[in-house]
Image: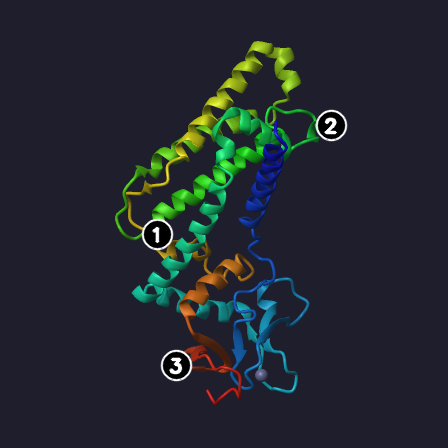
Amino acid sequence: MTADLESTAREAAKRLRNWRESGREADTRGVAYVGEGVLRCALCGTTLVVAQEDKGWYAASFSYSCADPGCGQGALPVAEVDRELEEFTRRRLKEPAVVAAWRATRLAKLDEQIADARLILPWCWDQRRRRQLSRRLAPSEWLFTPSTCMSGSRYHLYFFGAELTDLIVERARTVAEPQRGRSVGELAQAQREWAYLWLDLRRLKRRQVRRMLGRRALQEIDDDWEQRQTRLWDLLKETDWQYSGPARQPLDDRAMDQEWSQSPGAMARQRQSLLAYALGDNQLVLSATAAAGSRVRVVPAVSGGVFGAV
Ligand SMILES: [Zn+2]
Protein backbone atom coordinates (compact mmCIF):
# COMPACT_ATOMS: atom_id res chain seq x y z
CA MET A 1 0.00 0.00 0.00
CA THR A 2 1.44 3.36 -0.94
CA ALA A 3 1.81 6.09 1.64
CA ASP A 4 -0.50 8.20 -0.46
CA LEU A 5 -3.38 5.75 -0.37
CA GLU A 6 -2.83 5.19 3.34
CA SER A 7 -3.21 8.87 4.14
CA THR A 8 -6.32 9.03 1.99
CA ALA A 9 -7.96 6.23 3.97
CA ARG A 10 -7.20 8.16 7.12
CA GLU A 11 -8.71 11.28 5.62
CA ALA A 12 -11.78 9.40 4.48
CA ALA A 13 -12.28 8.01 8.00
CA LYS A 14 -11.89 11.46 9.51
CA ARG A 15 -14.26 12.95 6.97
CA LEU A 16 -16.83 10.23 7.66
CA ARG A 17 -16.72 10.89 11.40
CA ASN A 18 -17.05 14.65 10.89
CA TRP A 19 -19.87 14.17 8.45
CA ARG A 20 -21.87 12.08 10.89
CA GLU A 21 -21.09 14.52 13.71
CA SER A 22 -22.25 17.59 11.79
CA GLY A 23 -25.53 15.95 10.79
CA ARG A 24 -26.41 15.25 14.38
CA GLU A 25 -26.93 18.71 15.86
CA ALA A 26 -28.81 18.42 19.11
CA ASP A 27 -32.24 19.94 18.80
CA THR A 28 -32.22 21.81 22.04
CA ARG A 29 -28.62 23.00 22.12
CA GLY A 30 -28.43 26.69 23.02
CA VAL A 31 -32.14 27.36 23.17
CA ALA A 32 -34.76 25.85 25.44
CA TYR A 33 -37.87 27.76 24.27
CA VAL A 34 -38.96 28.74 20.82
CA GLY A 35 -39.35 32.44 21.63
CA GLU A 36 -35.96 32.72 23.30
CA GLY A 37 -33.69 35.20 21.55
CA VAL A 38 -36.46 35.92 19.02
CA LEU A 39 -39.07 37.89 20.97
CA ARG A 40 -38.46 41.50 21.88
CA CYS A 41 -40.06 43.62 24.54
CA ALA A 42 -42.77 45.90 23.13
CA LEU A 43 -41.87 48.68 25.58
CA CYS A 44 -38.09 48.88 25.37
CA GLY A 45 -37.02 46.61 22.50
CA THR A 46 -34.79 44.40 24.64
CA THR A 47 -34.64 40.73 23.75
CA LEU A 48 -36.79 38.76 26.15
CA VAL A 49 -35.50 36.02 28.41
CA VAL A 50 -37.24 33.05 29.94
CA ALA A 51 -37.59 33.23 33.69
CA GLN A 52 -39.08 30.91 36.24
CA GLU A 53 -41.88 32.63 38.13
CA ASP A 54 -42.02 30.30 41.08
CA LYS A 55 -40.35 27.09 42.07
CA GLY A 56 -42.80 24.84 40.24
CA TRP A 57 -41.40 22.34 37.77
CA TYR A 58 -44.46 22.54 35.54
CA ALA A 59 -44.45 24.45 32.26
CA ALA A 60 -46.85 27.13 33.52
CA SER A 61 -44.23 28.44 35.90
CA PHE A 62 -41.99 29.66 33.06
CA SER A 63 -42.46 33.10 31.54
CA TYR A 64 -41.00 35.34 28.90
CA SER A 65 -39.94 38.54 30.57
CA CYS A 66 -37.95 41.67 29.81
CA ALA A 67 -34.26 41.45 30.63
CA ASP A 68 -34.32 45.07 31.83
CA PRO A 69 -35.54 45.06 35.45
CA GLY A 70 -36.57 48.72 35.23
CA CYS A 71 -38.78 48.25 32.18
CA GLY A 72 -42.10 47.47 33.81
CA GLN A 73 -43.23 45.01 31.16
CA GLY A 74 -45.00 42.14 32.87
CA ALA A 75 -44.00 38.52 32.46
CA LEU A 76 -46.03 36.32 30.13
CA PRO A 77 -46.46 32.56 30.45
CA VAL A 78 -44.38 30.63 27.91
CA ALA A 79 -47.23 28.23 27.07
CA GLU A 80 -49.64 31.06 26.12
CA VAL A 81 -47.08 32.89 24.02
CA ASP A 82 -45.93 29.69 22.29
CA ARG A 83 -49.54 29.02 21.26
CA GLU A 84 -49.56 32.37 19.46
CA LEU A 85 -46.18 31.67 17.91
CA GLU A 86 -47.44 28.34 16.59
CA GLU A 87 -50.57 29.93 15.10
CA PHE A 88 -48.45 32.56 13.40
CA THR A 89 -46.01 29.96 12.06
CA ARG A 90 -48.79 27.71 10.74
CA ARG A 91 -50.47 30.59 8.97
CA ARG A 92 -47.32 31.91 7.33
CA LEU A 93 -45.90 28.51 6.34
CA LYS A 94 -48.85 28.01 4.01
CA GLU A 95 -48.02 31.08 1.94
CA PRO A 96 -46.39 30.18 -1.39
CA ALA A 97 -43.48 32.63 -1.09
CA VAL A 98 -42.61 31.34 2.37
CA VAL A 99 -42.89 27.72 1.21
CA ALA A 100 -40.58 28.49 -1.74
CA ALA A 101 -37.97 30.08 0.53
CA TRP A 102 -38.15 27.13 2.91
CA ARG A 103 -37.77 24.66 0.05
CA ALA A 104 -34.78 26.44 -1.49
CA THR A 105 -32.93 26.62 1.83
CA ARG A 106 -33.73 23.03 2.76
CA LEU A 107 -32.58 21.72 -0.63
CA ALA A 108 -29.35 23.72 -0.48
CA LYS A 109 -28.58 22.23 2.92
CA LEU A 110 -29.37 18.68 1.78
CA ASP A 111 -27.30 19.11 -1.39
CA GLU A 112 -24.34 20.25 0.66
CA GLN A 113 -24.56 17.26 3.03
CA ILE A 114 -25.02 14.81 0.16
CA ALA A 115 -22.09 16.30 -1.78
CA ASP A 116 -19.85 15.94 1.28
CA ALA A 117 -20.88 12.30 1.61
CA ARG A 118 -20.11 11.64 -2.05
CA LEU A 119 -16.45 12.35 -1.35
CA ILE A 120 -16.40 9.38 1.03
CA LEU A 121 -18.51 7.00 -1.06
CA PRO A 122 -15.72 5.72 -3.36
CA TRP A 123 -14.20 4.18 -0.22
CA CYS A 124 -17.33 2.09 0.21
CA TRP A 125 -17.63 0.71 -3.29
CA ASP A 126 -15.20 -2.17 -3.27
CA GLN A 127 -14.54 -4.54 -0.45
CA ARG A 128 -10.80 -3.99 -0.31
CA ARG A 129 -11.02 -0.23 0.13
CA ARG A 130 -13.97 -0.65 2.48
CA ARG A 131 -11.75 -2.74 4.72
CA GLN A 132 -9.01 -0.15 4.66
CA LEU A 133 -11.54 2.45 5.70
CA SER A 134 -12.91 0.12 8.38
CA ARG A 135 -9.51 -0.36 9.98
CA ARG A 136 -9.19 3.41 10.18
CA LEU A 137 -12.62 3.83 11.72
CA ALA A 138 -12.14 1.42 14.58
CA PRO A 139 -8.45 0.66 14.87
CA SER A 140 -8.29 -0.68 18.40
CA GLU A 141 -11.82 -1.24 19.45
CA TRP A 142 -11.45 -5.02 19.72
CA LEU A 143 -9.06 -4.49 22.61
CA PHE A 144 -11.72 -2.98 24.83
CA THR A 145 -15.11 -4.34 23.89
CA PRO A 146 -16.40 -7.84 23.34
CA SER A 147 -16.44 -8.49 19.64
CA THR A 148 -20.07 -8.49 18.58
CA CYS A 149 -21.12 -9.20 15.04
CA MET A 150 -21.60 -5.47 14.58
CA SER A 151 -18.79 -3.89 16.49
CA GLY A 152 -16.49 -1.15 15.39
CA SER A 153 -16.15 -0.33 11.76
CA ARG A 154 -19.34 -2.09 10.72
CA TYR A 155 -21.25 0.23 13.00
CA HIS A 156 -19.75 3.36 11.43
CA LEU A 157 -20.26 2.24 7.85
CA TYR A 158 -23.78 1.03 8.52
CA PHE A 159 -24.88 4.36 9.98
CA PHE A 160 -23.12 6.30 7.26
CA GLY A 161 -25.10 4.38 4.61
CA ALA A 162 -28.38 4.66 6.51
CA GLU A 163 -28.06 8.39 7.21
CA LEU A 164 -27.03 9.20 3.66
CA THR A 165 -30.03 7.23 2.36
CA ASP A 166 -32.35 9.24 4.62
CA LEU A 167 -30.97 12.49 3.20
CA ILE A 168 -31.36 11.35 -0.41
CA VAL A 169 -34.92 10.21 0.24
CA GLU A 170 -35.71 13.50 1.97
CA ARG A 171 -34.22 15.44 -0.92
CA ALA A 172 -36.31 13.56 -3.48
CA ARG A 173 -39.42 14.23 -1.39
CA THR A 174 -38.62 17.92 -0.98
CA VAL A 175 -38.12 18.81 -4.66
CA ALA A 176 -41.30 20.39 -6.01
CA GLU A 177 -40.78 19.85 -9.76
CA PRO A 178 -41.12 16.43 -11.43
CA GLN A 179 -37.82 14.55 -11.34
CA ARG A 180 -36.07 11.95 -13.43
CA GLY A 181 -34.19 8.97 -12.09
CA ARG A 182 -34.65 5.82 -10.08
CA SER A 183 -37.36 5.60 -7.49
CA VAL A 184 -36.12 6.36 -3.98
CA GLY A 185 -38.35 3.50 -2.87
CA GLU A 186 -35.68 1.12 -4.16
CA LEU A 187 -33.01 2.82 -2.11
CA ALA A 188 -35.17 2.85 1.00
CA GLN A 189 -35.87 -0.87 0.52
CA ALA A 190 -32.15 -1.71 0.31
CA GLN A 191 -31.57 0.33 3.47
CA ARG A 192 -34.37 -1.53 5.27
CA GLU A 193 -33.00 -4.92 4.31
CA TRP A 194 -29.61 -4.01 5.68
CA ALA A 195 -31.31 -2.63 8.80
CA TYR A 196 -33.17 -5.92 9.44
CA LEU A 197 -29.88 -7.77 9.56
CA TRP A 198 -28.39 -5.10 11.78
CA LEU A 199 -31.27 -5.48 14.24
CA ASP A 200 -30.87 -9.27 14.24
CA LEU A 201 -27.16 -9.20 14.82
CA ARG A 202 -26.25 -6.17 16.84
CA ARG A 203 -26.21 -7.95 20.18
CA LEU A 204 -24.78 -11.27 19.08
CA LYS A 205 -21.21 -11.96 20.04
CA ARG A 206 -19.08 -13.54 17.35
CA ARG A 207 -17.61 -16.01 19.80
CA GLN A 208 -21.04 -17.25 20.85
CA VAL A 209 -22.22 -17.65 17.27
CA ARG A 210 -19.12 -19.64 16.46
CA ARG A 211 -19.49 -21.86 19.49
CA MET A 212 -23.22 -22.48 19.13
CA LEU A 213 -23.74 -22.52 15.41
CA GLY A 214 -20.29 -23.17 14.05
CA ARG A 215 -17.78 -21.35 11.94
CA ARG A 216 -19.86 -21.84 8.83
CA ALA A 217 -22.84 -19.97 10.30
CA LEU A 218 -20.58 -17.06 11.14
CA GLN A 219 -19.30 -17.04 7.58
CA GLU A 220 -22.87 -16.98 6.31
CA ILE A 221 -23.67 -14.00 8.49
CA ASP A 222 -20.62 -12.17 7.19
CA ASP A 223 -21.51 -12.97 3.58
CA ASP A 224 -25.08 -11.81 4.11
CA TRP A 225 -23.81 -8.58 5.63
CA GLU A 226 -21.48 -7.99 2.68
CA GLN A 227 -24.22 -8.69 0.20
CA ARG A 228 -26.74 -6.32 1.77
CA GLN A 229 -24.31 -3.48 2.19
CA THR A 230 -22.95 -3.93 -1.35
CA ARG A 231 -26.50 -3.60 -2.64
CA LEU A 232 -26.90 -0.23 -0.91
CA TRP A 233 -23.45 1.10 -1.88
CA ASP A 234 -24.11 0.10 -5.51
CA LEU A 235 -27.40 1.96 -5.54
CA LEU A 236 -25.69 4.99 -4.02
CA LYS A 237 -23.62 5.28 -7.20
CA GLU A 238 -26.77 6.73 -8.76
CA THR A 239 -27.13 10.49 -8.53
CA ASP A 240 -30.65 10.95 -9.91
CA TRP A 241 -33.58 9.93 -7.77
CA GLN A 242 -37.24 10.59 -7.88
CA TYR A 243 -40.19 10.38 -5.57
CA SER A 244 -43.65 10.07 -7.08
CA GLY A 245 -45.77 11.24 -4.14
CA PRO A 246 -46.66 14.81 -3.18
CA ALA A 247 -43.73 17.08 -2.33
CA ARG A 248 -42.99 17.73 1.32
CA GLN A 249 -44.37 20.91 2.85
CA PRO A 250 -42.83 22.87 5.72
CA LEU A 251 -45.80 21.98 7.91
CA ASP A 252 -44.90 18.28 7.50
CA ASP A 253 -41.89 18.96 9.74
CA ARG A 254 -41.83 16.92 12.93
CA ALA A 255 -41.55 20.18 14.86
CA MET A 256 -45.22 20.76 14.02
CA ASP A 257 -46.42 17.35 15.26
CA GLN A 258 -47.14 18.39 18.83
CA GLU A 259 -48.98 21.49 20.00
CA TRP A 260 -46.33 23.99 21.03
CA SER A 261 -48.26 25.18 24.05
CA GLN A 262 -48.54 21.60 25.33
CA SER A 263 -44.83 20.89 25.01
CA PRO A 264 -43.04 24.23 25.36
CA GLY A 265 -39.59 22.74 25.90
CA ALA A 266 -39.67 20.26 23.01
CA MET A 267 -37.77 20.65 19.74
CA ALA A 268 -37.22 24.34 20.45
CA ARG A 269 -34.41 24.71 17.94
CA GLN A 270 -36.30 23.05 15.12
CA ARG A 271 -39.44 25.05 15.87
CA GLN A 272 -37.36 28.18 15.91
CA SER A 273 -36.02 27.46 12.45
CA LEU A 274 -39.60 27.13 11.13
CA LEU A 275 -40.53 30.35 12.92
CA ALA A 276 -37.58 32.05 11.21
CA TYR A 277 -38.99 31.10 7.77
CA ALA A 278 -42.39 32.40 8.87
CA LEU A 279 -40.84 35.70 9.99
CA GLY A 280 -38.67 36.45 6.98
CA ASP A 281 -37.27 39.96 7.45
CA ASN A 282 -39.65 40.82 10.25
CA GLN A 283 -39.28 40.58 13.98
CA LEU A 284 -41.61 39.78 16.82
CA VAL A 285 -42.51 41.97 19.74
CA LEU A 286 -44.42 40.89 22.77
CA SER A 287 -46.57 43.10 24.93
CA ALA A 288 -48.48 42.33 28.11
CA THR A 289 -51.63 43.84 26.65
CA ALA A 290 -53.31 41.93 23.88
CA ALA A 291 -54.12 43.85 20.69
CA ALA A 292 -56.83 42.19 18.58
CA GLY A 293 -56.55 39.08 20.72
CA SER A 294 -52.83 38.62 20.31
CA ARG A 295 -49.83 39.67 22.36
CA VAL A 296 -47.28 38.75 19.76
CA ARG A 297 -46.98 41.36 17.03
CA VAL A 298 -44.98 41.26 13.81
CA VAL A 299 -43.06 44.41 12.98
CA PRO A 300 -40.52 45.18 10.26
CA ALA A 301 -36.97 44.67 11.48
CA VAL A 302 -35.28 47.88 12.55
CA SER A 303 -31.59 48.07 11.87
CA GLY A 304 -29.83 49.46 14.91
CA GLY A 305 -31.06 52.81 16.24
CA VAL A 306 -33.91 53.50 18.56
CA PHE A 307 -36.66 50.96 18.89
CA GLY A 308 -39.65 52.85 17.55
CA ALA A 309 -43.13 53.07 19.01
CA VAL A 310 -45.08 49.93 18.23
ZN1 LIG B 1 -38.71 45.92 28.30
Disc 1 from disc 3: Cα separation:
33 Å
Identity, as a three-letter code, of the amino acid under mark 1: Arg
Q: How is the image coloured?
A: rainbow
Residue 105 is situated, as x and y percent measured from the top left of the image, at 41, 59
Q: Is residue 263 visible?
A: no
Q: Secondary structure at mark 1?
A: loop
Residue 61 is situated, as x and y percent measured from the top left of the image, at 61, 68
Examine the rendered structure and indicate whether residue 309 appears above or below residue 231. below
Disc 3 from disc 2: Cα separation:
67 Å
Examine the rendered structure and indicate whether residue 180 appears above or below residue 98. above
Q: Which mark is first along the chain, 2 or 1?
A: 2
Residue 153 placement, left or right of 256 = right
Examine the rendered structure and indicate whether residue 27 appears above or below residue 95. above
Identity, as a three-letter code, of the amino acid under mark 2: Leu
Residue 205 is situated, as x and y percent measured from the top left of the image, at 64, 22
Identify the residue at image location x=54%, y=24%. Answer: 128
Disc 2 designates what residue? 143
- Bin the neighbour count of mark 1 within 10 Å (Cα to Cα): few under 14, some 14-19, many 20 and up: some
Disc 3 designates what residue? 292
Of residues 197 and 32, the one drawn nearer to the viewer in this rendering: 197
Residue 211 placement, left or right of 295 = right
Q: In what quadrant of the picture does the N terminus appear? A: top right
Picture disc at residue 186? none
Of residues 304 and 55, the one drawn nearer to the viewer in this rendering: 304
Q: Contact, CB < 8 Å: mark 3 with mark 2? A: no
- Bin the neighbour count of mark 2 within 10 Å (Cα to Cα): few under 14, some 14-19, many 20 and up: few
Disc 1 designates what residue? 248
Disc nearest the viewer among 1 and 3: 1
